[in-house]
Image (cartoon, rainbow, N blue to C red):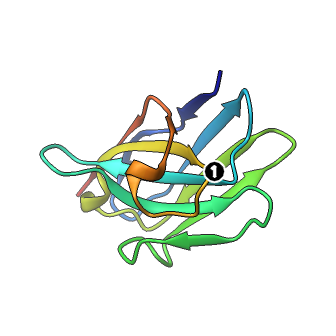
Amino acid sequence: QVQLVESGGGLVQAGGSLRLSCAASGRTFSNMGWFRQAPGKEREFVGAIGWSSGGTYYADSVKGRFTISRDNAQNTVYLQMNSLKPEDTAVYYCAASTLYSRSPVQYTYWGQGTQVTVSS
């Protein structure tokens, strides 16, 4: 049984930073992604990381501001978010996939989500 548990969300002012964590148990997958969903909008790809390679890729909207990293020993993936903007407000999810993909349909397991709110 795979379980993904996010933590680290909260309220922050514009320009501030937050770090989200995603602890994985059960097994590891080749690719871990972060997505977000704002009210009334579709789930949006944020970025992803390969468990073995550590290679990362990001959505254009967060490139240069967000950084994904992983701790293989702790089976944990992180999303460091800097220079936050009000439009970054959303529920953030981590997800696991065997494929290197930006599409949420390619991700098999999902965490419960954590709320990030950026005030202006």
Q: Residue at x 49, y 64 (%)?
A: 82
Given the image, on which type of amino acid does mark 1 rest?
A: Tyr
Pointer 1: residues within 10 angstroms few (<14), some, or many (20+)? many
Residue visible at 44% across and 59% down in the picture: 16
Q: Position of residue 32 (x, y in %)?
A: 60, 51
On the image, the x and y values in percent for residue 119 come to: 26, 51
- Quadrant assignment for the C terminus: bottom left
Task: Depth check: give the residue in front, 17 or 70.
Answer: 70
Which residue in the rendered view is the most extreme toward the top? 1
40 displayed left or right of 30:
left
Residue that appears at 30% across and 47% down? 90
**Which picture quadrant has residue 61?**
bottom left
Q: Is residue 47 above or below residue 1?
A: below
96 to 3, vertically: above or below: below
| Residue in the foreground of this view, choosing between 117 and 104 | 104
**Is 15 placed left or right of 67 in the picture?**
left
Quadrant where the N terminus lies?
Answer: top right
* Residue 96 x %, y %: 57, 44
Depth check, front residue: 52 or 21? 52
| Left or right of 117 in this view: 93 | right
Left or right of residue 8, residue 91 in this image: left
Q: Which residue is mark 1?
A: 78
What residue is rendered at 22% in x and 51% in y?
A: 42
